[in-house]
Image (cartoon, helix red, strand yellow):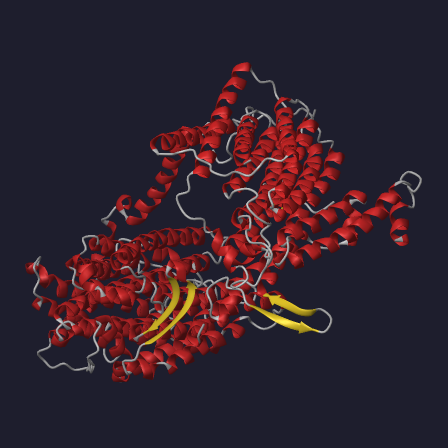
Amino acid sequence: MKSTLKKLGYNRVHKQMNDVFLKYTAKVVFLVIITFSINLFFSGHYTPGGGFVGGLLAAGAIILLLLAYDLKTLRKMLPIDDKRTITLGLAISFIIPVLLMFFGTPLFTHQYTYLQLPVFGEVPLHTAVIFDVGVYITVAGTTLLIITLLASEQFMSDAEGADKE
Amino acid sequence: MEILIIVLAGLLIGASVYLMLSKSLLRIILGTGILSHGILLMLLTMGGLKRGGIPVLDDSVQQYTDPLPQAMLLTVIVITFALTAYMLVVAIRVYRELGTDDVEQLKGVPREDD
Amino acid sequence: MTLIHFAILLPVIAAVGIGILYRFYKKIHLGWFVLPIPAVITVYLATLIPAVSNNQVIYETMQFMPRVGMNFDVYIDGLSLLFAILIAGIGTLVVLYSIGYLSQQEKLGNFYVYLLIFMTAMLGVVLNDNVLMLYLFWELTSISSFLLIAYWFTRERSIYGAQKSMLITMFGGFLMLGGFIILSLITDTYSIRGMIEQVPAIQEDPMTMLAIVLILFGAFTKSAQFPFYIWLPDAMEAPTPVSAYLHSATMVKAGLYLVARFTPLFAFSELWVWSILGVGLITLVWAAFNAIKQDDLKAVLAFSTVSQLGLIMSLLGAGALAVQTGAAEGLFTVAVVAAVFHLINHATFKGALFMIIGIVDHETGTRSLKKLGGLMTIMPISFTMTLITSLSMAGIPPFNGFLSKELFLEAMFALREADFSVLADVSVLFPLLAIVGSIFTFVYSIILIRGIFMGKQMPATPKKPQEAPALMLISPMILTILVVVFGLFPNILSGSIIDPAAMSILNTSEPLNTEIYHWHGWDSPALWSTIAIIAAGTLMYLFRDVWKPVYRLGTDAFTLNYLYDQGLIYSRLGAERITDGYMTGYIRSYLIYIFGAFVIFSLITLINTDISFDWGVTAPIALPEMLIILIILAAVAAMLITRSRMVSIIMFSTIGFSLSLLFVFFRAVDLALTQLAVEAITTALFLLAFFHLPKRSRHEEHRRFKLNNLMISAAVGIVATVIGLAAYSNRLFDSISQFYIDNVYDLAAGGNMVNVILVDFRGLDTLFETLVFGIAGLGVFVLLKLRVNKEGENKYEEHP
């Protein structure tokens, strides 16, 4: 935390003093939202939630960081190419139904089993959840890609003075 | 309740058409957003409203609200977001390349292969 | 999922690994990793030969989409096993050959991935019993062929050839699907075996004629029959291993497979027999005639392939008569045996010839007959192989081509005995056309040998010629040895492979006990025809300068290629004219078309339908809900009136958030959550886009303009409301929701019905929805980042 502060705001510290609170809060809230999003995702099979909401919330959390910091810092914190993320997500959700055919059942017949774990007790294992991981990643990746692209455009148009009126 | 919501949905659809027929690109985009809101409400109502518990399995609940429209509409919401984002960016690009967002003036840009 | 399914899908599964491997490891030629795949499949298929030649049939099913009748039913009898072994076997040799042919500078990853996809597609076509799956794999072969022809995609000829082959074969394939659908409507099954059991029903149905025509379109386009053959010469732009594999040995034979497979179904039809016989013979003569005038070696082979395909096609047509008369009579059974035998022989000698031409091209740098000559002493091994395979193609004893050509001539002479109801007097034409075609075949075979290897050595070759490396010679060598072995001992094939295949074409279980002889006695008409062919062919070759001006008689204006090109140009022009007719260029016009059509058609339907508005019990209205509805109404009103873009965006968000509250009241928790998240992100999106859009949100609008809009929107709104009310109060079908509610735990082991429907029951919808979502994201990326720079190239900007 301190080191990022130094890197980011050392020169402009008097200008952006009140940003410190925003940034700190953003980080805490980010963690809260991400945890909530993962919780929503995993409980999605039994209680409200699922890949779509989870992915959107995860993207929302990262957008919060984007608003508190700026794009460059965000890229440093999360050095991921969103296009790769989308590819990964789509690959997961496309491979699962194909793999499922190896069980000798028609396309999209999910398999499930229950596992006895020491702490958690009976835990269901479900291939539908893996499929949902693909959905989660795709939704989060795409949303982030769109938002970060527009945010990066903002820098460019500031430089160009694109407002033509 | 259902009748009221259907009329509300009809109103939203009508308003969205009015917005979409206007000249400004931003209003057209907002119009499509409203249109999808109207259709969301309309389709949700088709399964009946407040007919039972939330569609999550529970031994104490006898009757559930229709889960099928909800599942279909969930995808509608997400796709609408993608659509809105895409159209916004088209609008931005159009404005940057041509310097106007008036759709009446967008006509007449010659094709490149002519 | 059984072993045989795995064998069919193995190439595609391996293709994923091969593609990834190529990205990270380039030291060893990629072909070495690909080679084991077809080799293993060949060995596996060969182990099935004993069972199949004992008249057993292998049938394995795998459910794919059982509800629509689309199952992956593998069905192996003699016919499909023959094709499958050809595909896998030649595939192995072609991969081996390509290791020498393609240098490591080429994009090997693309090449082998496409090739592996093709292997799966082709195996899928020939081993399938379900017509829908057959169509699926059929089109997959067209697509992979398209990709392989356009392998050198920077060359204009490659793109032209690829597009041409795709347009023509897909056109035929699509018509074929129509034929399949008609058949399945008649017989109520998608299984080919099931259809064959119902031949009497098919025979009586008047739609059968249409089905025959449509299916023949598919077969003729794929197998490059007259007049659709024009795509094959242009497909020669592909790398030579591809030409040897797809456009000579396997893919173009898919049409033959289709005809053979459907022979038991349609043999009763005169239309079937006549069109196949006629088209086959015309193709044989016309393509052989055209092969002589070609200068490019691959073009010679392309036309020769077309002509040989026509030969086999005509034999299958004659073979259908055997089904009519009963296989026991044996008169036309010889045609079926000849077809199967020639199919094998053609794969061996033509595959070898393509590979040798590839070697010549590779080592001298040219394929033009004018620039080649006298290579006999420099490339002795290639010369020997060309000599053997070309003579086999020409029908000279003792090679295998001679044997099948004798059988072919015999079958054509037998046609004179056939009891035809129509055209009885012209039956003498069949042997005549066969002999004429064979003479042309003889001539171009000799041209191949003499033009490349004999005569004076030409100094003008771009590269200094030398014998090819051993790696490239192995594959054609194996094929040439097969040509000789099959020529000397044809009966090693007849019991194990030819008979089972012929029996499945004839749909009989009586053993044929075929014996193929070199010598049929002095009174055999085939013998005298062969002697006549050799004599006439030699004369025509010697005096070719005298009669060659014949080729200059035709004009360019009426060739099929000209028609194809003009057709492309005019269909584009026509489409443009139609489009320009209603595309005014204003979004508003299009929206008015859409909404106008919506209103008008809905009104017509509503007026003509008997609807009662009776909504029974409705849910009570609570105060908070009323409040939210009022908020939404106010926000909509504000949006319509305001001129400020900020206000409209805030009002838009208000509507969205209110909606999510409504969802909570309506017990739609998942919807409410998603709507909330989406609304938050959408608002952020609009605010970000704010900077890039003009400050003014509205343009001056005339009163009449507004009034028009108001009328249209009011009409749409009212019609939508009426439709909603009508739909709500009239239920034509029972709701299917109860199924999901009942089975959410038993079938899917889940609790949240909405999510279980999304990821399990309707998983395919969700899958493609995420795909659409991802594509939208990439679309946004392209729209924002793609710029045309000054050189006219597309360029992406990097992040700032």
Whether residue C629 is situated above or below residue C700 in the rendered picture: below
Q: Position of residue B49 (x, y in %)?
A: 55, 42
Whether residue C678 is situated above or below residue C348 in the rendered picture: above
Seen in the image, is B56 located left or right of residue C90? right
Whether residue B96 is situated above or below residue C110 in the rendered picture: above
Q: Residue furthest left?
A: C425
Q: Position of residue C797 (x, y in %)?
A: 67, 45
Query: Is residue C786 visible to the viewer in this orientation of the structure?
Result: no
Query: Is residue C306 visible to the viewer in this orientation of the structure?
Result: yes
Q: In the rendered picture of this protein, how many numbered marks are placed on residues? A: 0
| Residue at 52% in and 70% down | C14
Closer to the camera in the image, C436 or C254: C254
Whether residue C601 is situated above or below residue C44 in the rendered picture: above
Closer to the camera in the image, A50 or C308: A50
Closer to the camera in the image, C296 or C602: C602
Instruction: Determine which quarter of the picture holds residue C75.
Output: bottom left
Closer to the camera in the image, C616 or C746: C616
Seen in the image, is C5 located left or right of residue C511? right
Q: Position of residue C127 (x, y in %)?
A: 36, 70
Q: Residue furthest top?
A: C703
| Residue at 12% in and 61% down | C429
Q: Position of residue C774 (x, y in %)?
A: 59, 50
Location of the N terminus of chain B (image quadrant): top right
